Amino acid sequence: MPQPKSIAAALEPRVRAFVAEIANLVQSQIRDVLLAQLGGRTAAAPAKPRRAAAAPRAARAARPVSAKQRRALVLQGRYLGSIRTLSPADREKVKALREKAGIEKAIALAKELQKKA
């Protein structure tokens, strides 16, 4: 088992570094509060160095979306929008109907349930 003096000697530099870091954070907080209270009546704080801007990426050509895909996306959006405000129990009912009868009937049921709520 290590001796108490050796433990203290090993921990002392870490404790000192921790205390110094806390002191720096407190000073930074105080400075920020004072600058905010003064309302910018002091000299401007030095700006942080900026990173170099990333090179612009080449734009990818958008893939054409077929009419079938577009309709599926529209229906998916309508479905998600319609179940958004439902209770968890009603959502389960709508999800079950979607599995059985399809998305259009599920959207219709969701709209009905919204009217009742």
Image: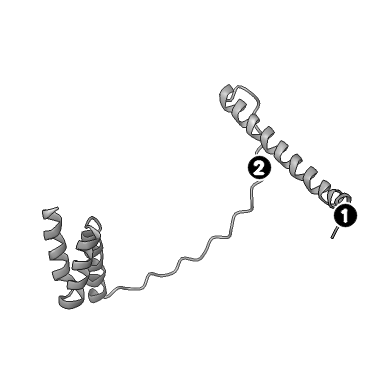
Other residues around mark 2 within 10 Å, as few (<14) / some (14–19) / many (≥20): few
Residue 3 — which label?
1
Vertical position of residue 42 compared to residue 1: above or below: above
Tell me: 21 left or right of 105: right
Q: CA distance from mark 1 to mark 2?
A: 47 Å
Question: Which residue corresponds to mark 2?
Answer: 48
Where residue 107 appears, x then y in whole percent?
16, 65
Q: Earlier in the sequence, mark 1 or mark 2?
A: 1
Given the image, on which type of amino acid does mark 1 rest?
A: Gln
Number of on-image labels:
2
Which residue: 52% across, 64% down? 57
Tell me: 28 left or right of 106: right
Helix or strand or loop: what does disc 2 sit on? loop
Vertical position of residue 55 compared to residue 64: above or below: above
Which residue: 25% across, 58% down? 84
Where residue 83 appears, x then y in whole percent?
22, 61
Which residue: 57% across, 23% down? 37
Which residue: 14% across, 53% down? 117
